[in-house]
Image (cartoon, helix red, strand yellow):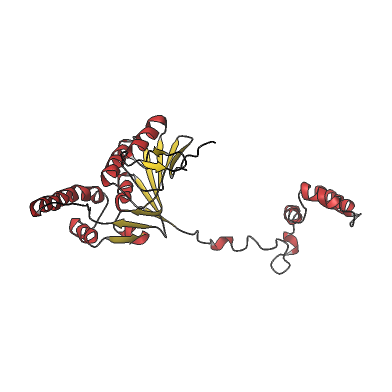
Amino acid sequence: MKQKRKQPSFSFRQSGETLELYIYDEIKSDKDKEFNWSTWSYDDPEVSAKKVREILESNSNAKALDIYVNSNGGDVFEAYAMASLIQRFSGYKTCYIDGMAASAASLIPMVCDKVVMASYASILIHNMWTVACGNAKELRETADMLDDLMKSNRQLYLSRFNAGEDKLIELMDAETWLSADEAKAYGLVDEITSKKEEDPSDEDEDEDPLNEEDTDDDDVTEERIREALAGIIVSQKKASSFYARKDVPDAKAKMDFFKRFAEKI
C-alpha cells in the first residue's frame, strides 16, 4: 500500500524570473518534526528557515521574490532566520498578506521592499512570551531576557513603523490586531488591495450598440452591425449540436443564412 505524505502548506513555484513563496502554516523550528500517521514517521515542518534556504538555493536564478502570507505565527527565532534569508535575497521582494500575518509571521513583511495587504486581512503584533519554571531569581532572569529580546524584536517593525517606538510599545503591550487601513497608516503596509471600482466611462459598455434611443441612423456602421451579430451567432460546437436536433430540421439552413449574411456585411 502506497503511503501518503502530508500535503504541504508552505509551497513555492517559479514563474519566469519571479519566485513565489507561500507561507500558509505555523512557523516551526526544524527540530519540531511532526508525526505522520499515514507513514508512521516524522516529517520536517513545512514552514521553517531550512525550507526557505533550500528553496532559495534551488532557485538561484530568480530575479524577484513574491511572498504570500497567511499564518498565525510560531517560533520567533525561526521567523528571524527566515527574515534574514529573505532580506539577503538580492532581487526585489514583495510580500502579500492574504489572510493574516500574526505574531512571528508579521516579521516577514518587514524585510520586503513592498507590502501589499488585502483590505480584509489582519496583522497581529504583541510582546514575546515563553514558558518558564524555577525559583524567583530564575523567573526574573527570564523576564529580563524577554525585555532584552523585545528591544531587538522592535527593530524589525521600526524599519517601517512611522509612529515612534513608544507607540509601538503601546500597541505590542496591548496585543493589537491591525486592520489593513491601520497597518498602512502606521507604515507597515504600502498598498491595500480591494474590489476594483467601476469606471464611469465604462457604464455604457454593455448597452445595445444598436439601441434606437441613443443611436442615430448615421452611426449604424458595418463594424457595429458585425459586433451586434457576433453576440447572436453561436459557437461552432454549439451549432453542430443544434444542427443535429431532429425536432428542428431547418436549423442548419437558418444558421448558414446568418453566417453568410455576417460575411457579406
- Left of 223 or right of it: where is 164? left
Q: Quadrant of residue 65?
A: top left
- Left of 186 or right of it: where is 249? right
x and y, in percent, of residue 6 in the image: 46, 42
Q: Residue furthest bottom?
A: 213
Give the mark count.
Answer: 0
Query: Which residue is nearer to you in this view: 143 or 222?
Result: 143
Which quadrant, please, contains the N terminus? top right
Rendered view: 196 above or below 33: below
Q: Residue furthest right?
A: 249
Which residue is at a point 49% across and 59% down the rendered structure image? 195
x and y, in percent, of residue 105 in the image: 33, 49
Rendered view: 115 above or below 215: above
Rendered view: 93 above or below 143: above
- Left of 121 or right of it: where is 132? left
Which residue is at a point 72% across and 65% down the rendered structure image? 211
Q: Say if residue 265 shows up in the picture.
A: no
x and y, in percent, of residue 210 in the image: 73, 62
Query: Which residue is nearer to you in this view: 67 or 104?
Result: 104
Q: Quadrant of residue 225?
A: bottom right
Q: Quadrant of residue 250?
A: bottom right
x and y, in percent, of residue 124 in the image: 31, 57
Q: Say if residue 138 shows up in the picture.
A: yes
- Left of 165 or right of it: where is 258? right
